C-alpha cells in the first residue's frame, strides 16, 4: 500500500517521528485502532493508528473527504496534521513560535497547520505569505513537491493536495479547489494582472470585471478597454490562474509608496 499525501508530508518531508496515541486509561481498551487503512487519507496505519473518535477532532467537518470511510482508525500523520500539539512539537524542534503573538491580558493561542500555507518537498519547507507565494509559483522547488494554499486560514488543506512532479506543470490546492498551473502561462497572466493593478485597478475588479468608474476615468477609456480585453480573456480561459494572481499579485515599490 502506498503512503498518502499526509504521510509523505509528515514523514518524508518534515522527518517527524510517528505521532502515536497515548496509552489508554482503561486496560479494556486497545491503544491502537483496529484497521490497516486510515479513515481520512487511506494510507497504511502499520498497526499504530489512532481510534478514529480519539484522533480526529469533532470540529473536523470534511467527513465526505474520507478515503476509507469504513475504517475506524486514523493514521498518526493525519492526526498530527489536525493537531495543535503536533504543530507545537514540529515548531519547537525548528525553533519557531508555537503560539500567536500574545496580547496583553489574553491567554496564548496555539498555532495549527490550518493557519499556514505550505510549499513542501523532501528538501525544502516554506510557509509562504502572499509575496512569497508569488515567487514560488514563478519558481517552484525541485520536484516532487506539494503546494497547499490556505486562502482563508480556516480549512485543513494538506490532505486534499497532490504531489507535483514537474516545475512546468503542477497543481496548487487552494482550500477546496485544485488549480492546475502551467508556469509560463501563469507568468504571462500575472504580468498582465500586475500591470493593471499598478495602473490603479483593484484586484477584485480585475478578478470579477466589475470596475470602479473613477478608476476607469483615471486611466482613460481606451486603456481600460485594453486592460479589460486581456483580463476578460484570462477570466474565460484560466479562472484558476486568475484566483492565484488575485491572491499573490503585487504592486511595484513605487506604486506601493503612492497608494
Image: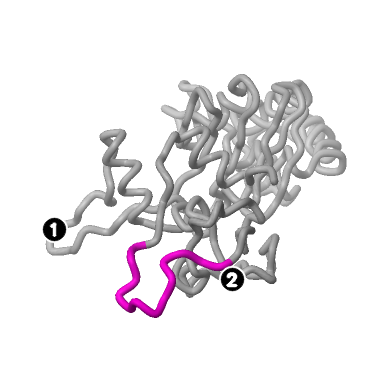
Q: Which residue: 41% across, 76% down?
A: 29
x and y percentages locating residue 143 in the rendered image: 65, 23
x and y percentages locating residue 167 in the rendered image: 70, 22
Please rate how many residues cluster around mark 2, counting C-alpha atoms within 10 Å: few if below 14, some from 14 to 19, many from 20. some
Q: Nearer the viewer, residue 55 or 175?
A: 55
Snapshot quadrant of residue 73? bottom right
Question: In this rendering, is residue 171 above or below 44?
Answer: above
- Which label sits on residue 238? none
What count of labels does the image hold? 2
Name the residue that disc number 1 marks. Answer: 104
Q: Nearer the viewer, residue 215 or 184?
A: 184
**Magenta span: chief secondary structure:** loop
Q: Is residue 102 left or right of residue 79?
A: left
Q: Secondary structure at mark 2?
A: loop
Q: Nearer the viewer, residue 225 or 117?
A: 117
Chain-order first, disc 2 or disc 1? 2
Snapshot quadrant of residue 61? bottom right
Q: Which residue: 31% across, 49% down?
A: 88
Q: Is residue 206 left or right of residue 109?
A: right
Magenta residue span: 22-34
Q: Nearer the viewer, residue 248 or 211?
A: 248
Q: Is residue 220 left or right of residue 233?
A: left
Q: Secondary structure at mark 1?
A: loop
Q: Is residue 30 visible?
A: yes
x and y percentages locating residue 47 in the rendered image: 53, 57
Question: In this rendering, is residue 142 above or below 84?
Answer: above
x and y percentages locating residue 193 in the rendered image: 68, 32
Q: Is residue 214 visible?
A: no
Name the residue that disc number 2 marks. Answer: 72
Mark 2–mark 1 Cα distance, whole angstroms, equals 43 Å
Q: Which residue: 63% across, 70% down?
A: 63
Q: Residue furthest left?
A: 105
Amino acid at each position: 500500500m502506498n503512503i498518502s499525501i499526509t504521510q509523505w508530508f509528515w514523514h518524508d518531508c518534515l522527518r517527524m517521528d510517528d505521532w502515536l496515541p497515548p496509552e489508554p486509561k482503561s486496560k479494556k481498551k486497545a491503544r491502537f485502532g483496529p484497521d490497516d487503512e486510515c479513515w481520512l487519507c487511506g494510507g497504511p496505519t502499520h498497526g499504530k493508528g489512532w481510534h478514529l473518535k480519539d484522533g480526529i477532532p469533532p470540529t473536523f467537518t470534511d467527513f465526505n473527504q474520507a478515503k476509507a470511510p469504513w475504517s475506524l482508525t486514523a493514521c498518526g500523520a493525519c492526526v498530527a496534521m489536525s493537531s495543535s500539539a503536533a504543530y507545537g512539537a514540529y515548531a519547537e524542534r525548528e525553533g519557531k513560535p508555537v503560539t500567536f503573538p500574545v496580547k496583553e491580558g489574553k491567554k496564548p493561542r496555539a498555532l495549527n497547520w490550518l493557519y499556514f500555507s505550505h510549499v513542501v518537498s523532501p528538501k525544502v519547507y516554506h510557509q509562504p505569505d502572499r509575496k512569497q507565494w508569488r515567487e514560488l509559483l514563478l519558481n517552484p522547488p525541485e520536484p516532487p513537491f506539494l503546494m497547499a494554499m490556505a486562502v482563508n486560514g480556516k480549512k485543513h488543506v494538506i490532505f486534499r493536495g497532490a504531489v507535483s512532479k514537474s516545475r512546468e506543470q503542477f497543481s496548487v490546492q487552494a482550500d477546496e479547489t485544485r488549480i492546475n498551473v502551467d508556469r509560463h502561462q501563469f507568468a504571462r497572466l500575472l504580468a498582465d494582472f500586475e500591470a493593471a493593478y499598478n495602473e490603479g485597478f483593484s484586484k477584485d475588479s480585475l478578478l470579477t470585471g466589475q470596475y470602479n468608474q473613477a478608476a476607469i476615468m483615471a486611466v482613460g477609456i481606451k486603456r481600460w478597454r485594453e486592460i479589460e480585453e486581456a483580463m476578460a480573456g484570462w477570466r474565460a480561459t484560466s479562472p484558476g490562474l486568475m484566483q492565484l494572481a488575485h491572491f499573490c499579485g503585487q504592486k511595484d515599490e513605487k506604486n506601493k509608496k503612492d497608494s
